Image (cartoon, grey):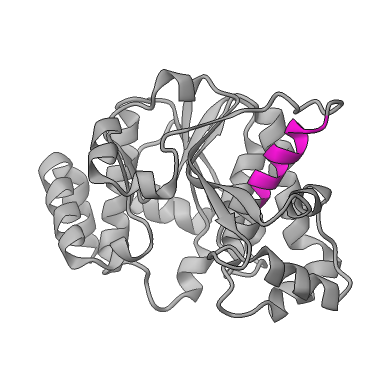
Amino acid sequence: MKAVWSLWTKPLRENRQSIWVSNKHHLLSWILSVETAKKHYPETALFTDSEGARMLVDELGLEFTQVFTELDALENSDPRLWALGKVYTYRTQTEPFIHIDSDVFLWKPLPSEMVSAPLLAQNPEYFVVGNSCYDPEGMETAISHINGWLPEEWMWQRSCGLLQTAYNCGIFGGHAVDFIRYYASLAIEFVEHLSNQLAWLILHPDSERNILFEQYLLGCCVRYHQHQTKSPYKDIDVKCLFSSLDDAFIPDNAARVGFTHLIADAKKNRKIAEHLEHRVKKDYPKYYYSVINSF
């Protein structure tokens, strides 16, 4: 199983306010994410752009089995849609893989039933429309205003009632690479479809765009094809590390499986930043001082 990371640097350049305590801690997180996972999955790949390869490989010195700069193709894309770098990377894969976010640390290998599954993800996210950070109805309103396009899988799941399914992609991958490429291609088409361009602009500023086309559309694709008897993907199954996001937030559960994901505001927590810096300095001093010297 190959461990894969992705970095599209345009969102970093365009966003003047870092989501981390500092840019230093962003790089420290990269070190810890890559080095902890390599202990379990020595075959590694980085999908990035030229600037990302220069930052992580040439300057920081991180070592990957393979480095690709295919995300240079996103130079003209909207940096607010930062998950595009991830779905472009998903679409590129041709063999079983685990995509690992750079704020995820694998202290232990994933359970064998996950690594051998058609699809793997961090956890399912079930939500009720109108009462969630997911906002499919907002996107649908924007699409209807400009006569845009929605994938059939999206419309099918929305027709199934208020309770909807998405998947957290802190980790994502599996053996069903044909399905993953299909889903990722659909996500890219949804984002880049000419008739949808204005919809992304008029969508409410507080609407979280990225989880719609990455995590929600993934849930739509899985559920839709499981219910289509003639679909080549009808037997797709998803194995998750946690049963829900709430389950993932329970410290004992995370410790048991050896998994850390610094979600959202955790990146701004100074106490966590101190722990991150101490851990990298202790376990990976070569990389730590490389970061310190760069600042």
Range drawn in magenta: 217-228
Q: Is residue 200 left or right of residue 87?
A: right
Q: How many marks?
A: 0
Identify the residue at image location x=33%, y=49%.
30
In this rendered view, identify the residue nearer to me: 168 or 48.
Answer: 168
Identify the residue at image location x=70%, y=68%.
137
Asked whether the viewer can see residue 70, the reply is no
Q: What percent of the width, then of the height, locates residue 295?
A: 22, 66
Q: Is residue 225 magenta?
A: yes
Q: Is residue 285 left or right of residue 105?
A: left
In this rendered view, identify the residue nearer to me: 108 or 6.
Answer: 108
Against 133, is 222 above or below?
Answer: above
In this rendered view, identify the residue nearer to me: 67 or 24.
Answer: 24
Q: Is residue 92 left or right of residue 113?
A: right
Identify the residue at image location x=64%, y=51%.
164
Q: Main secondary structure of the magenta part?
A: helix
Q: What percent of the width, then of the height, locates residue 6?
A: 50, 48
Q: Quadrant of residue 208?
A: bottom right
Q: Is residue 266 left or right of residue 193?
A: left
Q: Is residue 22 magenta?
A: no
Asked whether the viewer can see residue 4, the reply is yes
Q: What percent of the width, then of the height, locates residue 283?
A: 14, 40
